[in-house]
Image: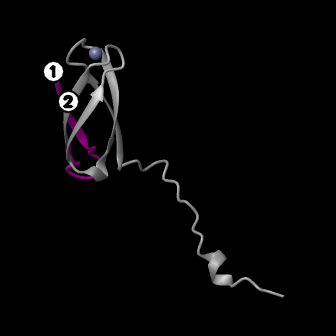
Amino acid sequence: MKKKPKHLSEKKKKKMKRPAERRNEFTATYACAVCGEENEVFIELRNGNKQTLVEDCEICCRPNVLNILVIPAAGEGDEDSILIDVEFEG
Ligand SMILES: [Zn+2]
């Protein structure tokens, strides 16, 4: 009779949910540089405070280059802010 080593099953970690703390991701909006429609963009903060993303507009399907700058909160009670500069990748 074989017994499974106990430590193996104990190694499985439960996934921790962090519903209140979502500091690693942002959903921001930007206005398309071509048609002006608002689009949503998902930004992962672990990729850095300065990011460049290319997103296709949902309305006109043109590529927008988003220069994203995340400004971390200055202190308690303050929130991170996000700046998005949109260019049309022509
Ligand atoms: Zn557009």
Q: Where is residue 2 in the image (x, y as percent from the top left)?
A: 79, 86
The residue that mark 2 highlights is 65
Determine if the magenta segment contains residue 89: yes
Foreground of the two, 39 or 60: 60
Mark 2 CB in 8 Å range of ligand 1?
no
Q: Which of marks 2 and 1 is in front?
A: 1
Please identify the quarter of the rendering in which residue 37 is found.
Answer: top left
Q: Where is residue 25 in the image (x, y as percent from the top left)?
A: 36, 45
Residue 51 as seen in the image, left or right of residue 21: left
**Residue at image x 35%, y 50%?**
24
Q: Is residue 81 above or below residue 12?
A: above
Please identify the quarter of the rendering in which residue 4 is found.
Answer: bottom right
Chain-order first, disc 2 or disc 1: 2
The residue that mark 1 highlights is 90
**Residue at image x 28%, y 43%?**
79
Foreground of the two, 10 or 5: 5
Check the picture and name the quadrant holding the N terminus: bottom right
- The magenta region covers 70-90
Ligand 1's quadrant: top left
**Residue at image x 63%, y 79%?**
8
Check the picture and name the quadrant holding the C terminus: top left
